[in-house]
Image (cartoon, helix red, strand yellow):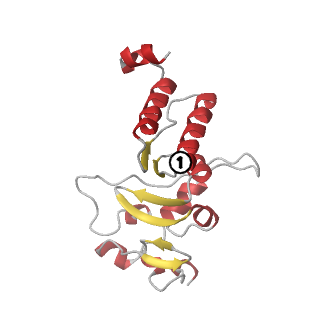
């Protein structure tokens, strides 16, 4: 009932209905860019699927670009073409989605993917040791350095620039300052 929806306050709508209203506004304004910030958070699986189908349809039919902000690795893998991984407010790795999930380079991205529970293969998901840095007083170098098992001297001094590791894949990690050379194997 569109009339009732227009006269309703957000608190009067379910989470899924609020998401649909936001998507409807996006469709109605026919923009070239859709920014979806945690579009499936706190929705049941059925409603998540409906919201995802609406987003995919909008992107495909309108030719719109999508910026998806999410903590859901499965959602990112399913709906995106490129992934940009952030840690403590900094972009640390960017690649085509299939490439990043196949071969992550940054130690945080590797830990993040290893922390996802698997349905097959047994064993437990691994966590990332340590604590996230204080945003008010971050470490002087790489923000992941205090938690990184591969950290070495340059990591403590300055944030690493982006290093190209091939196929449009970039990583902000001193381990890869010489391309794909990986100090973990040195």
Observer-nearest residue: 93 or 54? 54
Could you tell me residue 103's position as x and y percent?
Answer: 61, 68
Above or below, comparing residue 130 to residue 156 in the picture: above
Could you tell me residue 177's position as x and y percent?
Answer: 44, 82
Quarter of the picture containing the C terminus is bottom right
User: Could you tell me which residue is drawn at 64 percent across and 65 percent down?
Assistant: 102
Q: Outermost residue toward the left?
A: 136
User: Could you tell me which residue is drawn at 46 percent across and 32 percent down?
Assistant: 24
Task: Determine the image quadrant of residue 167.
Answer: bottom right
Whether residue 26 sits left or right of residue 44 in the image: it is left
Above or below, comparing residue 143 to residue 118 in the picture: below
- Name the residue beneath numbered marker 1: 59
Above or below, comparing residue 117 to residue 144 in the picture: above
* Tally of marks: 1
Dot 1 crowding, Cα within 10 Å, few <14, some 14–19, many 20+: some
Observer-nearest residue: 44 or 103? 44
User: Could you tell me which residue is drawn at 53 percent across and 70 percent down?
Assistant: 105
Could you tell me residue 74's position as x and y percent?
Answer: 60, 48
Observer-nearest residue: 57 or 81? 57
Could you tell me residue 77's position as x and y percent?
Answer: 60, 53
Mark 1: which secondary structure?
A: helix
User: Could you tell me which residue is drawn at 60 percent across and 39 percent down?
Assistant: 53
């Amino acid at each position: 009932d569109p009339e009732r929806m227009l006269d309703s306050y957000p608190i009067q709508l379910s989470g899924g209905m609020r998401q649909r209203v936001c998507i409807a506004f996006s469709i109605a304004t026919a923009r070239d860019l859709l920014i979806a910030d945690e579009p499936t958070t706190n929705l049941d699986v059925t409603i998540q699927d409906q919201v995802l189908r609406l987003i995919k349809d909008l992107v495909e039919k309108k030719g719109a670009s999508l910026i998806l902000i999410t903590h859901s690795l499965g959602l990112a893998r399913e709906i995106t073409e490129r992934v940009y991984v952030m840690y403590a407010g900094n972009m640390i790795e960017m690649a085509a989605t299939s490439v990043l999930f196949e071969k992550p380079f940054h130690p945080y991205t590797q830990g993040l993917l290893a922390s996802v529970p698997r349905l097959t293969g047994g064993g437990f998901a691994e966590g990332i040791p340590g604590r996230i840095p204080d945003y008010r007083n971050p470490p002087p170098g790489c923000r992941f350095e205090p938690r990184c098992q591969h950290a070495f001297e340059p990591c403590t001094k300055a944030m690493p620039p982006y290093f190209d590791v091939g196929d449009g894949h970039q990583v902000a990690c001193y381990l890869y300052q010489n391309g794909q050379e990986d100090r973990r194997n040195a």
